[in-house]
Amino acid sequence: MSVAEPSHVSSRDNPLLKELRKLAHDPGGYRRNGRIWLEGDHLCRAARDRGVRPAVAVFAESLWATARHEWADAADKTVVVADALLAGISGLESPAPMGFLLDLPARPQVAPDAPTVVLDRLQDAGNVGSILRSAGAFGFRQVVALKGTAALWAPKVLRAGMGAHFGLKLIEGVEADALDALAVPWIATSSHRGDLLHRTRLPFPCAWLMGHEGQGVSAALEARAAHHVRIAQPGGEESLNVAAAAAICLHASAAGADS
C-alpha cells in the first residue's frame, strides 16, 4: 500500500493549527470540537498500541526527517509543521515534537456487570488522570464520571493518565441516575466511617465510589452504597489524597479477586 505524502504547514493562521491551539489550552475544548489532541511520543504510542488510528498525525519538521519511516502510515493524514509553530501550540514547558488528533469516541452505555470506578465531582485533573491509570492497572475497565468531574479527555488528564485512557471504557458528564444501570455492589470510601479496608472481604466485581477532594462522596450516593470502608492510617494523617486512596482500594479489590 502506498503512503500519501505529508502536507506541510508554515503559517500560524492555518486552520489546523488554530484548532490544535484551542484543544491544547481549553480543558473542555474537545467536547465542542469533537476531537482530542494527544501531545507527545508516549501518548501517541499508547494510542497506537491499543489500535487507535488518529485522523491526523502532526510532526515537527526536525522529527519527521528522522522518524518518517516509523510513523509514515500512523494516521489517515500526516501534517509536517515548522518546529517553532508546533512549539507555539503546546501547553507544556518542554513542547513535544509530535501529536495525534483523534475523533472523540461516542459515549458508551454503562455496562451493568463491569468492575467500575465512579468519579463523583473530582476537580483536580492530576487526580483524575492518576485514578484512570490505577483503574487500568487493576482491571477496572469502566469509569463513570458524574457531572462536575474534571473533563476526562482534557490535556492535563491525558498526561496524568499516561495512556490508560485507551484501555478503558469512559463514560463522562452523566447524572447520578446513570448509575442505576450498575448491577454490581457499590463501595464508598470515607476517612472517618466504615470497616477497615484490610479487614474487609471485598465483593468483585464492584463499583468504587471516589468523591470530591474536599467533600468526599455525596451523601446521596453514600446512602446507596452496599459497603463503606476506610483505610487504616497508623501514621495519624487526617486523610489521604483521593488518587492515593483509589490506588489502595483498587489494588485491594484486584488482589482479593485473585485470591
Image (cartoon, rainbow, N blue to C red):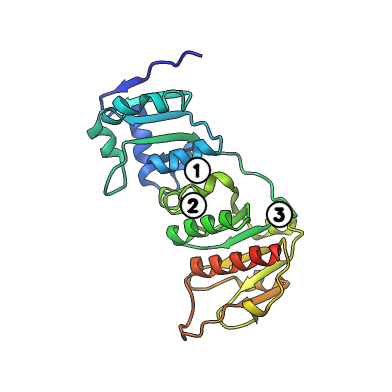
Q: Could you say whether the residue bearing mark 1 is in a helix, strand or loop?
A: helix
- Work out whether residue 253 can be spotted: yes
Q: Residues within 10 Å of mark 2 (few under 14, many from 20)?
A: many
**Decide: marks 1, 2 in contact (CB < 8 A)?**
yes
The residue under the point 38% across, 34% down is 19
Q: Using the image as rendered, state which of residue 50 and residue 111 is in the foreground.
A: 50
Q: CA distance from mark 1 to mark 2?
A: 9 Å
Looking at the image, is mark 3 or mark 2 nearer the viewer? 3
Label whose residue precedes the other's in the sequence (3 or 2):
3
Q: Residues within 10 Å of mark 1 (few under 14, many from 20)?
A: some
Q: Using the image as rendered, state which of residue 37 and residue 138 is in the foreground.
A: 138
Q: Which quadrant of the rendered structure holds the C terminus?
A: bottom right
Q: Residues within 10 Å of mark 3 (few under 14, many from 20)?
A: many
**Pointer 2 residue:** 151
- Work out whether residue 34 can be spotted: no
**Pointer 3 residue:** 114
As drawn, the label of residue 124 is none
The residue under the point 73% across, 58% down is 182
